[in-house]
Image (cartoon, grey):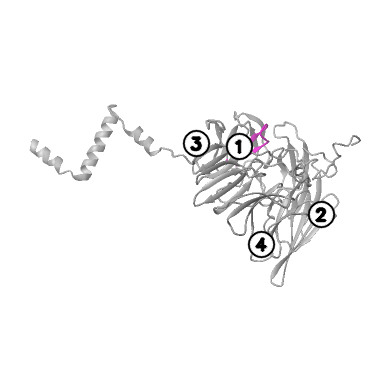
Amino acid sequence: MIVATVCGVKGLGVRGWLLLGLVTVVVLAATGVWNPFPAIWDWVDRRQPISDPDVVWQQRIGGTPKSVTIAGDTVVIEQRTRVEARSLATGTQLWERKADWAAVAGGTRDPVVAVGKLLVKGYELLDPTTGVVRRRDDDAVAVWTYRNMLLDAHCVEPTDCTLTAWDPRGTRPLWTAFLPGVSTGLFADNPNLLGTRRLTAPRIDGGVAGPESVPPLLGFPVDGRVHVVDTATGRVVQNVEPGRDERLAVIGGRMLRINAVSRDGTCQYVISARDPATGQEAWRKAGVNLRTADSAGCVQREDPQGARNVLIGVAPDGREAVIDGYDGRLLLVDAEGEKLLAVDDRYALVRTADKNTVVGRELGVDRVRWNRPAGDRPGAALTPYAAIVTQEKPNRLAALDPRTGRELVVLRTSANALAVGPNGMIIGEGREIGYVRFGGGGAEPPPDDGGVPDPDPDTGGSPGPATGGGPGDQPDCGPKRELCPDPGDDDG
């Protein structure tokens, strides 16, 4: 009998021994004698640091994030069907709830989180720290979130809609405006309006800068027409239908009529910027391609490239230029072979013609602020607190002071830059996210009230374009505050 048993065991083979061992382990685990499965799972699930130097904290979330925003002392993470908030200091989850979309409004001191469900009217405004509902709306079809304002749209009929402006944490409307309907594509959070189209970069999320200040004017597309709304007062200042070869855009307090026609086998462009209040032409440029038409012809299907109050154009000789949307000034013209990587109202990041250097320039000042080696396939973005620069082979992710080029942090990582705040940034790879603190703090952000930057302290030169607009501005100052009284004038 013993001999038969031994012979049977010897004849098990490799698969038999593995099966016998698995059965033995399961029996031991079930009886509580020995359970190796937790240790095995911990080994399989062990998290590797996503950067070198290591992050302050690293957490694995439930799914790949759709968006990540730093909101005061919290991090708001939007996923496909859920939204959650985590402590910026520790990464600990503060709250979680079901939602199809989420967007952050307000600045560092007064953030709120708007959440809602697709194809369902209404939204809720949550406190980012506690998740408590601060305000609830049951009828809005669309929401737009900014640093200093929140807008929502209500429609009692398809051709009868009301646009309402709120302070991010306010409970009473700032103003209301009536629109004859909204575009069928305007629903959920931050549907597209007629403004600028940002430059994109690999490994940098498009919303890395967080919410921006509301522009002085917004262009709402409705039934083939454009309704221009003054965000300081809520007054609808224009109701315009574009021409057959035109595309309209509202940028820098002006309404741009971009005309593109096919002649001699090429598209010929003319830009006419008009004062929305009077309809009079403020400036005009011919021959500048704002990249609104596709390569197949001159049909303009895209918004012009740019950021906030500035436009990016391409001259006939192929050089890129940054144009002030308000007065048409050329704020920057690249040299031949250079490529614009990122731009905002204050600075531009440019890759040099030899592709070996990234250069930081201040708009309106004809000199280089700083430069650094570009590495392979550089990408860049500008935020209020830092300039983000990426490279590959080797993978690097750097945050710099956009004015001086001072390194705030440099990481060896293949992770993406997801969100930037005053003192650090969130990076992520797949479901892993982590917080990186800046050494010495971030750069000084522009004021939230849309004020004009101070003159260059080194040259005494004139300031660049305005950095915002909206309710923080005096209503009669103009989008660039050109009508504001001199603060040093006692009679003003």
User: Where are the magenta residues, as a range?
Assistant: 100-117
Q: Pick whichever, 488 or 142, lies toward us.
A: 488
Q: Quadrant of residue 482?
A: top right
Of label 4 and label 2, which has the lower sequence position?
2
How far apart are the alpha carbons under marks 4 and 1?
A: 38 Å
Mark 1 vs mark 2, foreground winner is 1
To which residue does mark 2 refer? 274
Of marks 4 and 3, the one in the foreground: 4
Q: Which amino acid does the dot numbered 3 rest on? A: Gln
Q: Which residue is mark 1?
A: 70
- Which residue lies at the image location 60% right of the left edge and 45% below the top edge? 388
Q: Nearer the viewer, mark 2 or mark 3?
A: 3
Which mark, by number, is residue 266?
A: none
Inspect the magenta stretch and tell me whether residue 465 lies in it: no
Tag 4 and tag 2, C-beta contact below 8 Å? no
Q: Work out whether mark 4 precedes mark 1 in sequence or the reverse, and give the earlier one.
A: 1
Q: Which mark is residue 58?
A: 3
- What residue is drawn where x is 67% and y is 57%? 302
On the image, the x and y values in percent for residue 68 come to: 58, 40
